Image (cartoon, helix red, strand yellow):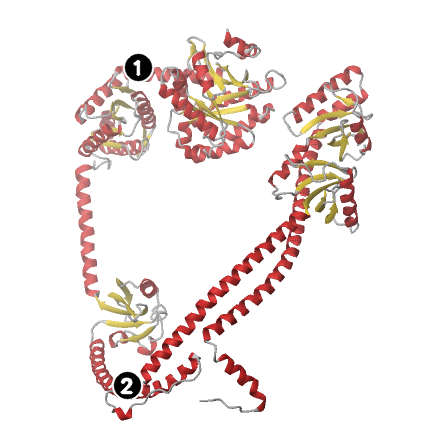
Amino acid sequence: MRAKFSAPGRWHEYISLLFLRNIEIRHRLISAFILVSLLPLLISGYIAYVDSNRAIETRTRIFSTEVVRQVSKNIELRMAQIDTESASLLSSNRVQHALTAFAQGNETARSAARRDLTQVLLDHYGATDYVNQKYFLDNAHRVVDTQVSGQLTRGVAQFVGFAPSVSGRPQWGSYDNGVGQQNIGMVRAVLSKNSSEPIGAIFLAIRPEHFSAIFDNVDLGKGADIFILDAGTGRVLVWSQGKQAVVGDNIGSTSSMLKKMAESRMHGEQTGFVTFNSISHEQYVAAYAIIPGTTWMAVNTIPKSRLTAEVQAVRNKMVLIGVLCFLFAIALAIIIAGSISRPLKALMDRMHETGNLVDPAAQDADRQRMPEVDGKDELSRLTLSFAAMNDMVNQKIAQINEINATLEQKIRERTAALEASEQESRTLIENSPDTIVRYDLDCRRIFVNPVFEASSTGGAQSLLGKTPSESPGGKSWELYETKIKEVIATGNNALFEQKWTDRNGQEICIHVRLTAERNADGHVISVMGVGRDITELSRSRAELNSANVRLAEMNTMLESLATLDPLTGLPNRRLLLDRLQKVLSTGERSGKHGAIMFVDLDNFKNLNDTLGHDTGDTLLQQVARRLQGCVREADTIARIGGDEFIVMLEDLSEKALEAAAQTEAVGHKILDMLSRPYQLAVNKYQISASIGATLFSDHRQTADELLKQGDIAMYQAKRSGRNALRFFDPRMQETVNARAMLEAELRTAITARQFHLDYQIQLRERPEDGRLQPSGAEALIRWIHPEKGMIAPQAFIPLAEETGLILPIGKWVIDTVCAQLHTWQDNALTCDLVLAVNVSARQFLQADFVAQVHSSITHHGVNPARLKLELTEGLLLDNVDEAITNMNLLNAIGVKFSLDDFGTGYSSLQYLKRLPLDQLKIDQSFVRDIVFDSSDLAIVGTIIAIAKSLNLNVIAEGVENEDQFRLLRINGCVHYQGHLFGKPVPVGQFEKILKQDWELVLSN
C-alpha cells in the first residue's frame, strides 16, 4: 500500500514519514533518549554551578555571623561571672573596713590593712587559675599589697587612669605589659557602703586562655580562624590555642579590616560581614560581633580562596558526572531500545506465523497467506499481522460463548441447592431452644432468632440495630458487649457465663459462646453469639457452695476447740508444741535464736479463794490480752493450765547475747504490764508474775526439755522474791546483768560528759613534688570511766547502737568536731585540714540528721567542705534510696563523704556510681598483710583502680610499717592513715605533730 498526498501543504510530513520508516525503532529511540537526557543535564549543571557559588558564600556569611555572635555572648557571660565574683568581694565588710583603715588610719593600721587585703585576695582568688595578677589600689592608684611593688607598670597605670572612679562598675580593656604584648585587665572602683564615695579600687589581670578556651569547641575548618580584636588599638587580644590569627598582630591588616567594619557599623548593627585584603593582597571575608561594654570584637576570618576552592571542586565533579551520565545514557538507551523493539519484533513474527495457520477443519482452497509488508518498520508489519489474528480471535469468542452458556446452567443448579441448604439452616436456628444473635463490627445486632426475640417486650424491632449496652442495658450487658469487642479485636472465640434479670424480675444465668465469623481473606466480619439457659444449674451450684462454706465453718470450730484455750482464746498446750516443733526446724536452717518464757502469776490462788473462780477467770482473760499487746504478731502466747502461760519468741538475733537481750526486753515489758492494776467488777486488784526464760536455736533440745528449763528458771525467779525474770543459764544471766550495768553507766557518761575525741593524722602526697603533707584527721571517740579508766569503743559502741544511745553520742561528736574546725580556721597551719567523723547507720537515717549537721555547721560558722562523714557499706546496702537522699542534701551544702571499710561488705558498683562520694577508704584488713599476701595486694590495686575510674580519691588506713607504705605508694595510693604516721592523740599533741617534716620522719 502506498500513501498519497492528501493535501498540498502536507508534503513535508510525508517526506519525514518516508525517511523515518527506513530507520528501525531502536535506532530512533537511542537518538531521542540521548538528546532528551543530555540537554537538561547541561542546563541544570550550569545553573547548579552558579547557584552553588552563591549558596556557599551565603552559608558562610550566616554560619560565621552566628559563630561570632555566640562567642561574643560566651565571653560576655565569663566577664559577667568575674564581675559578680568581684562585686561580692568588694561589698564584704572585711574589704570595706580594710580599705577605710588604709585610707584613714595610722601606719600600724595601714600595715594591718595591707596584710588583711593581701589575705583576702589569696582566699578569694588563690584557687582561681584564670586570674594572673590581682591587687587592691588606693585612691591614688598605688598598690595596697604586701607581695608586689608599690607602683604600677606604665601600661597598667594608663589603663587604671582611664577607668571611672565613682561608678562602682567594672571597666574592661587591654594594656601593654611592657614587652609589646597586650594583656586583658579589669579595674573596678570600691565604693564605701556608708558614703558611696570611692575608697580604693581592685585590679585583675585575666589570662587570655580563660577566654580562648571558648574557641576550643568551635570547628571552623581548614584556613579559618577566630580571635578577639581590640578596635581601639587594632591589636589581637585573644586567639585560639595553637593558632595565630590570619591578620595576626599586624597593624596594616587590622586597619584595613577595621575600616571595612567601621563602614558596616554605621548602620548601628552589633554584627556584620565584610571583605578585606591582607598585606599579602590575599582576599579574606570576616564576620564580627561587638562585645557589649568594651571596644572588643569577636572576629572570624576565612580566606576567600577556600570558598572558591569548594566551588571549583563542585564544578569539576559536575563535569565528571556529566561525562559519566552521557556514557550511562548511551548504554541505557541501547538497553531500553532493545527491550522495546525486541518484543515488538518477536510479536510480529509470532503473529505472522499465526496469521498463516490454517484451521484444521478448513480446506486448502480456503487458506489465505499474509501479504508481504513494505518498509523496514516493525510496526507496519505488526499491523498487518494483527488483522489476520483478529479473524481467529472471533472464532475463539464464539467457542467461549458456548462454554459460558454451559457454566450458567451449572450455576443455576448449584444456587438452588444452596438455597435449600440455607432454608434448612434457618429452620434449625428458628426452632433452636438456645438464643442465637449475630453482631456486626460495631456490636450492633443484625440477626436474632425467635427465642432471643421473645426475651424483649418490643420484639425484634427493639433489638435489631442496637448494642447490648443499649438494649436491654445495664452492667451485665455492658460486660457482654466488652466480650464481643475482644472477639472482634483478637479473632479468638470466647466462652463465659452471664447473669441478668428478665422482664419478670427473675435472675437468669446463661452460658454464652461467641464465635468470630470471617470472610475469604480471614478478616472478622461479624460475631455469632449462642446462649444456653443454665439458671437451674447455677442455682444448684450456689446451694452446693453454701453447704461447703457451712461445712468449713464447722471444721474450723472443731479445730478451734481442739487447739485453743476456751477461756482466753489462746493456743493450748497441743498447738504450742506443734508450733514450737516447727520453729525448731526452721531455726536450724536460718541460724536465728528463739526463746521460751514461762509466765506464772504470783499468789493467784489467793484471788480465787477470796473473790471466787469467776473473778479469777476474768483476771486470766485480761492477762491474756495484756500478753498479746507485749509481743509481735508472729510470736505465740499459750495458756497451758491454771495461771501458767507460755510466750514463744521467734526470729531473734543470730548471736546468743543479743537474743538474750531481746528476750529480756520483752520479759521486762511483760512484768511491767502485768503488774498494773486490774478492774475486776467493782474491785481493783494488783498482781505480779514470775518469768523463766530459755533460748533455743536448733534440734539439740526437744520441746519438752525447753518447757522444763523455762519452768525451772521460773521457780528461780520466784525464789528471788517474785515479780522477776530469770534465765535458765546462770552465766547468761550474769552477762545480761553486766550488759544492763554497762547501759546504765553509758547513760551516766552522756550526762556527765565523760567522752572526749582523739585525732589520728591523715597525710597526702602533694601532686607537684610528691612530698607528704597533712590533709586532715579522723576524730575517734574515747570513754574515760571514772573508775574503770579507758573503755574501748568496741566495748560500748554496739550497745549504744542497740539501745539508741548512739544518737546523742553521735550528735555530740559532730558538734565537737565543728567546734574544733572553728578553732582551727584562723590558724594557717590547720585552716585547710579536713576532719573525718564515723556516722552510724541509725544516726545517719534518723529523720532530722541532715538538719542536725546543718545546724552545727551554721552555729560554729565553719566551712562545710572541711567536714567529712564516713559511712559503712552495710548502711548503703540496706537503705540505698534513703541514704542517697540524705547524702545529696548534705553534699549540696558542701559536706564530703568517704565510704569506710571499702571491700569488706557487699559493694555494688551499680549503687556506688549513684553516690555523691569523695573518697573510698581501704580497710586495714587488706593493708595488714599486703606485704605477704598477693591476694590482698591485688584487692588493694583493684580498689585504687575503681576509685580512679569513678574520679574518687582513696585512702588506706592501718598503715603501720614502711613496706606497707611503699607498696601502697607504688600502686597509686596518695592518702594514708596509720600508726606509721601517728596514733590517735588528744588535740594538743595532734597540733604539735603537724609541724613535722614527714619525709624526714619516715627516712629516720
| Residue in the image at 44% along x and 82% along y | 375
The residue lying toward the viewer, choosing from 327 and 187, is 327
Task: Judge left or right: residue 136 versus residue 480.
Answer: right
The dot on residue 112 is: none
Residue 199 in view (yes/no): no
**In the displayed image of the protein, which residue is found farthest to the bottom?**
365
SS at circle 1: helix
Task: Judge left or right: residue 984 versus residue 681.
Answer: right
| Residue in the image at 18% along x and 56% along y | 544
The residue lying toward the viewer, choosing from 302 and 782, is 302
Kindly identify which residue carries mark 2.
400
Q: Residues within 10 Å of mark 2 (few under 14, many from 20)?
A: few
Q: Residue 827: give x, y in percent of width and height.
A: 62, 16
The dot on residue 734 is: 1
Residue 648 in view (yes/no): yes
Q: Amino acid at mark 1?
A: Glu
Tag 2 or tag 1, which sits nearer the N-term?
Answer: 2
Q: Residue 893: give x, y in percent of width and height.
A: 56, 31
Q: Residue 410: give x, y in percent of width and height.
A: 22, 84
Task: Judge left or right: residue 380 versus residue 772.
Answer: left
| Residue in the image at 69% along x and 27% along y | 132
